[in-house]
């Protein structure tokens, strides 16, 4: 991990916006009217999916993936102008939030400005044809960082954006060599020293696949040397296996506890139930009360939190990356109050610096225990909305559920769980 990364970044809530689909207009200016509502959720950073022009050659779908960028240094005309981008950044700052943009440095579109001007910056096979490490990404051309002239171009682009934004979410960060990221962070810090770096890190199966082809790809342990935050894809397959009933809660909990000791003490994971690359949480978790528990549990884990636009309303449709696919904001579910309250709890020192331990309490109920000095905070989440009993070391008495204000009674060291999420502290009322 970057040695100077502060554990205070565990307090962050990041709200991800796909500008094209977020509003009827699909523009940077139109997004501004939604900023107060986004701020009210407890949002610290707004992360914009790529806002650059999309390539045409090999385009997937009608409008193409925002990750097939034609020109790193321009704004997609369909979304607005450079002035619109600067104005949005100013409005985000006025709301007391910060702005993070997507940096896509593993590849460009197949008709990008960079490819036309510098074909030597790209991977080619023995016949001189463009070559991709991942053949499924047929709409992009992959960059070759063995050419150090490329480094200069990419870092200068980062400096240009660093004058305006407060953070970078770096796409496919592990496939870009770590020495580049270390140099980029060093040079960009001269423009903005407190810029936040988030890596889209990856899981073990993909790391094994890319390394088997003889290419660089960083593990999370390596990626933390250059980045402040990383995805929790290292345990993503375990999560999906638990949801699918392939492993028990006890096995999943062991994975989460092991994760907490694998990385440097100041590691910061970005916890998420959904993002633009994966199905909506409500698509995977059909039961609304289960979704409530999972939302609370996810935000109660050690680390920063990602909210993918629409998640707060339990949207189940995953927007297409390749077509215009507007969000349908009409829904009967509203998790906004829960998300706001869980974020409020995450600001407390005990959840930032405290000792962190998870336990399988039986019947698909998970306990998360934070402790610091004499203070203890306990979260109880019924992931399948089951009722049950949970044993605790808290003294008998009545406690206040800090999620919704309800009373929680402990008698004979036992809490009766009815299926709703609970967070209590070791101070009886």
Image (cartoon, grey):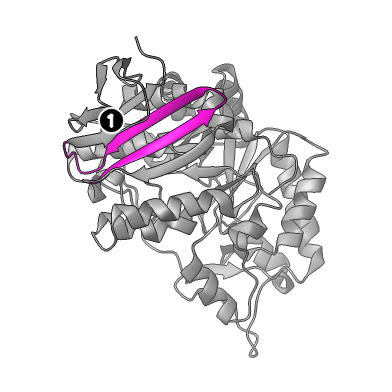
Q: How many marks?
A: 1
Please provide percent x and percent y for residue 82: 62, 36
Left or right, residue 201 beside residue 228 = left
Assess whether residue 35 is covered by the magenta stretch: no
Assess whether residue 385 is covered by the magenta stretch: yes
Majority secondary structure of magenta residues: strand
Residue lying farthest bottom? 127
Mark 1 element type: loop
Q: 424 or 121, which lies in front?
A: 424
Residue 185 is at least partly visible in this image: yes
The quarter holding residue 131 reads bottom right
Q: 127 or 166, which lies in front?
A: 166
Please provide percent x and percent y for residue 395: 35, 21
Please provide percent x and percent y for residue 262: 58, 55
Q: Identify the residue at horizontal 53%, vertical 22% (top origin).
A: 374
Q: Which residues are magenta?
A: 364-387
Left or right, residue 107 beside residue 367 = right
Above or below for 115 versus 337: below
């Amino acid at each position: 991990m970057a040695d100077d990364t502060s554990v205070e970044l565990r307090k962050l809530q990041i709200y991800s916006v796909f500008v094209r689909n977020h509003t009827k207009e699909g523009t940077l200016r139109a997004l501004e009217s939604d900023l107060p509502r986004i701020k009210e959720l407890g949002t610290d950073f707004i992360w914009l999916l790529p806002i650059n022009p999309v390539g045409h050659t090999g385009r997937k779908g009608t409008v193409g993936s925002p990750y097939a960028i034609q020109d790193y240094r321009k704004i997609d005309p369909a979304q607005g102008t450079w002035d619109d981008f600067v104005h949005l950044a100013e409005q985000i700052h006025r709301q007391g939030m910060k702005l993070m943009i997507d940096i896509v440095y593993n590849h460009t579109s197949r008709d990008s400005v960079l490819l036309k001007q510098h074909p030597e910056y790209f991977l080619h096979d023995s016949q001189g044809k463009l070559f991709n490490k991942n053949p499924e990404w047929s709409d992009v051309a992959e960059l070759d960082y063995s050419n150090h002239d490329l480094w200069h171009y990419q870092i200068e682009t980062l400096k240009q954006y660093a004058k305006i934004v407060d953070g970078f979410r770096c796409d496919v960060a592990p496939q870009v060599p770590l020495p580049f990221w270390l140099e980029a962070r060093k040079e960009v810090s001269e423009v903005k020293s407190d810029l936040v770096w988030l890596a889209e890190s990856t899981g073990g199966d993909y790391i094994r696949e890319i390394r088997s082809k003889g290419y660089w790809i960083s593990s999370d342990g390596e990626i933390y040397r250059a980045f402040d935050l990383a995805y929790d894809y290292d345990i993503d397959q375990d999560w999906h296996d638990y949801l699918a009933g392939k492993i028990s809660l006890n096995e999943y909990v062991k994975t989460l506890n092991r994760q907490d000791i694998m990385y440097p003490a100041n590691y910061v994971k970005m916890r998420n139930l959904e993002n633009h690359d994966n199905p909506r949480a409500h698509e995977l978790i059909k039961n609304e009360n289960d979704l409530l528990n999972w939302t609370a549990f996810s935000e109660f884990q050690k680390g920063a939190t990602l909210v993918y636009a629409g998640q707060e309303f339990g949207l189940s449709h995953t927007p297409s990356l390749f077509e215009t696919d507007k969000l349908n904001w009409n829904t009967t579910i509203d998790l906004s109050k829960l998300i706001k309250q869980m974020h409020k709890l995450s600001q407390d020192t005990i959840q930032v610096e405290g000792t962190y331990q998870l336990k399988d309490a039986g019947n698909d109920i998970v306990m998360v225990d934070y402790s610091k000095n004499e203070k203890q905070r306990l979260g109880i989440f019924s992931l399948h909305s089951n009722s049950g009993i949970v044993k605790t070391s808290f003294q008998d008495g009545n406690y206040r559920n800090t999620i919704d204000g309800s009373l929680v009674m402990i008698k004979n060291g036992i809490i009766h769980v009815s299926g709703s999420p609970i967070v209590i502290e070791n101070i009886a009322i």
